Amino acid sequence: MSKDIIVGLDIGTTKICALVGKIQPGNVLEIIGVGTYPSHGLRKGVVINIDDTVESIQKAVEKAEEMAGCEINAVYIGIAGGHIKSFNSEGAIPLKHKEITKKDIDRVIEAASAISIPMDREIIQTVVQEYIVDDQDGIVNPLGMSGVRLGARVHIITAAVTSAQNIIKCANRAGLDVCDIILQAIASSDAVLSNEEKQGNIILIDLGGGTTDMAVFSRGAVRHTFVLPLGGNNLTYDLSVGLKTSEKEAEEIKKKYGCGCVELASEEENIEVVGIAGKRSRRISKRTIAEILEPRVEEIFSLLYEDLIRSNVDVNLNRGVVITGGSAKLEGIVEVAERIFGVPVRIGYPKGITGISEVINDPMYSTAVGLVKYGAREGRKKKKFRIRDTNIFSRIINTMKKWFSEVF
């Protein structure tokens, strides 16, 4: 695979999406291939059947290879799931020289990330929020500046070791190397938010099938992230129970006639619902569907808002809320979110790409687009996950070896 080819692999609960991007002259990112396949083997973002997950990944990648006309052997993967936990940390180091070097920046990030976490958890991503030189904070890039002390504030995202290992293992068994793992909400933000929006206070909500991911941005950096183990599949299940029909039929009804806000649903518009276990079909109103869906939509946004309040981050959301992900297309979802958060809300579509953009101009592709953009931006930097490294603990061993070599 050419070094100019970047592949994002969105391993979701309802679908696997492989997106192929190519870096053209002038650093223009062109999408040249996409492949999707129903996701089998995951529940709420966590692998529960490796063989089924591997097969789904292979099918999606094969479709993307066919469209792009290239072989795929390395990917950037998005991760989600209720096991994801995140928090903020900070650290500081004395400066040996008057001018801050790249080595100093690496050292202070390492110092800020040197926190104690349980053995069953692994740091999968560290996002720098800002640097502090002496008493001056809010610095984006301290390289070349003068000072006697350098500090850093970072946002640390951790995952259950086994869950991260299983994601990597599935990709490897599908014949893929994992370049890096990125939280889905952060990846999606690269696709749908502008740098100007991130400079204000804004929330990105990625409403997927098995989970709903939230990322809060302020002054250009991630201030808080949260993964809620509820999503579009819960809406489908509620419809299935409420309408006494199969989940397959409920999913189709949700996509075609679903509405998450009762005020917007018509009492006169009726649809036919196929019965189960030999029961006759019957007609119900679109308003009845909304009456089933709205409580769950309200619950999801209410739980996100409650977490936002608990996080103690700045909630003066002058840039509002952006909702993306496959379930973001549900009618009425904006109105309910505005009711809960009390700020303007819009649906986020992928942007900043060329090529087959008309094909992927859909919120369901936001994570995959964000992964490709992340890979294009960070690809030349040090990779976090070594090729074929299915044992994350080996990274800890390698770090310890480095410590001993420095000491002795």
Image (cartoon, grey):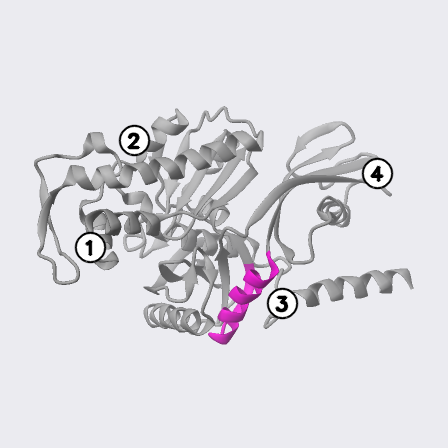
First in sequence: mark 4 vs mark 2: 4
Q: Amino acid at mark 2?
A: Glu
Which secondary structure, mark 1?
A: loop
Residue located beneath label 2 in the image:
335
| Magenta segment boundaries in residue numbering | 160-180
First in sequence: mark 4 vs mark 3: 4
First in sequence: mark 1 vs mark 2: 1
Is 296 located above or below residue 229 in the figure? above
* Distance between mark 1 and mark 3 Cα atoms: 47 Å
At 42% across and 52% down in the image, what residue appears? Answer: 367
* Residue 123 placement (x, y as % from top left): 64, 53
Q: Amino acid at mark 4?
A: Lys
Residue located beneath label 3 in the image:
386
At 28% across and 37% down in the image, what residue appears? Answer: 294
**Residue 234 visible at all:** yes
Depth check, mark 1 against mark 2: the one in front is 1
Q: Is residue 197 left or right of residue 269?
A: right
Residue located beneath label 1 in the image:
245
